[in-house]
Amino acid sequence: MWPVLAGLLGHLGLPWLLLVFGRGLGRHGAAVYDWGTVLCALPVLTLLSPQWTGMGLLWTVVAALAGVVLPLTAARLAGKPLSLAGKALPGGELARLTLCAAAEELLWRAGAPELLTRFGLPAPAATGLALAGFALLHLPGGGPRRLPYHLASGAVFTAAAATGGLAAAIACHLTHNLTLATAVPRRPPAPAARALPAVSDWE
């Protein structure tokens, strides 16, 4: 259990370390976070249990769709709609995002609740505390204003895990992150061109 606890605490501390010491990394900071997340999640593999496995393709597909709908809906409610016809990701970045999403789900939907219940917390309290930890994880990067969104997205991932297992949670998290990584702001429609007055109107 202690390696899992160390992985969770290390993952919580990783964004703060990057905030303080990672300014010189530039765009490479995201890659450092992603690969650091994968390393932190490795101890959780020792706790894998049958209830974490998927519960059918249908729930996984539903969760994947929910991962797309969530950021699009949030952006529209914020008055900043997104378009899915956006950027293409290089293969290496796609692989990194996939591994990071899987690692975060291992840590916060599987490892944290399992660890907390082994320490004596009831399952609902363990799940809620894990959700709070997941939201706080994003505080250094998004600030307090984005905390409600991270709580909401974490709740959706938690629901996916509860209904479809770990595979559904990973699918939901992955499509969510891919949507944010590839979608672009929707351009407002161009104003209609004003028709020139007829020549007869000038006479």
Image (cartoon, rainbow, N blue to C red):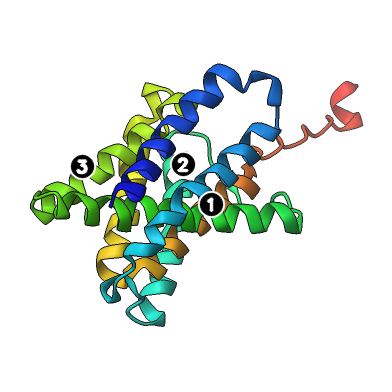
The residue carrying mark 3 is: 129
Q: Earlier in the sequence, mark 3 or mark 2?
A: 2
Which residue is more in the foreground, 126 or 162?
A: 126
Crowd rating for badge 1 (residues with CA inside 10 Å; few <14, some 14–19, many 20+): many
**Relative to residue 7, is residue 120 drawn left or right?**
left
Which of the 4 image quarters holds residue 195?
top right
Which of the 4 image quarters holds residue 29?
top right
> Closer to the camera: disc 3 or disc 2?
3
Residue 63 horizontal/vertical position (percent): 39, 66
The residue carrying mark 2 is: 76
Residue 51 horizontal/vertical position (percent): 26, 73
Badges 1 and 2: C-beta atoms under 8 Å apart? Answer: no
**Relative to residue 126, is residue 84 drawn left or right?**
right
Q: Earlier in the sequence, mark 1 or mark 2?
A: 2
Measure how far apart labels 3 and 2 are at the Cα level.
29 Å
Measure how far apart labels 1 and 2 are at the Cα level.
26 Å
**Identity of the amino acid at label 2?**
Arg
Which residue is more in the foreground, 174 or 25?
A: 25
Q: Residue at x 31, y 44 (%)?
A: 5
Badge number at residue 100: 1
Q: Residue at x 19, y 49 (%)?
A: 116
Query: Is residue 60 placed above or below 92 in the rendered structure?
Result: below
Query: Is residue 74 placed above or below 202 in the rendered structure?
Result: below
**Identity of the amino acid at label 3?**
Leu
Measure how far apart labels 3 and 1 are at the Cα level.
21 Å
Q: Earlier in the sequence, mark 3 or mark 1?
A: 1
> Which structural element holds mark 3?
helix
**Relative to residue 62, is residue 96 drawn left or right?**
right
Crowd rating for badge 2 (residues with CA inside 10 Å; few <14, some 14–19, many 20+): few
Which residue is more in the foreground, 159 or 190?
A: 159
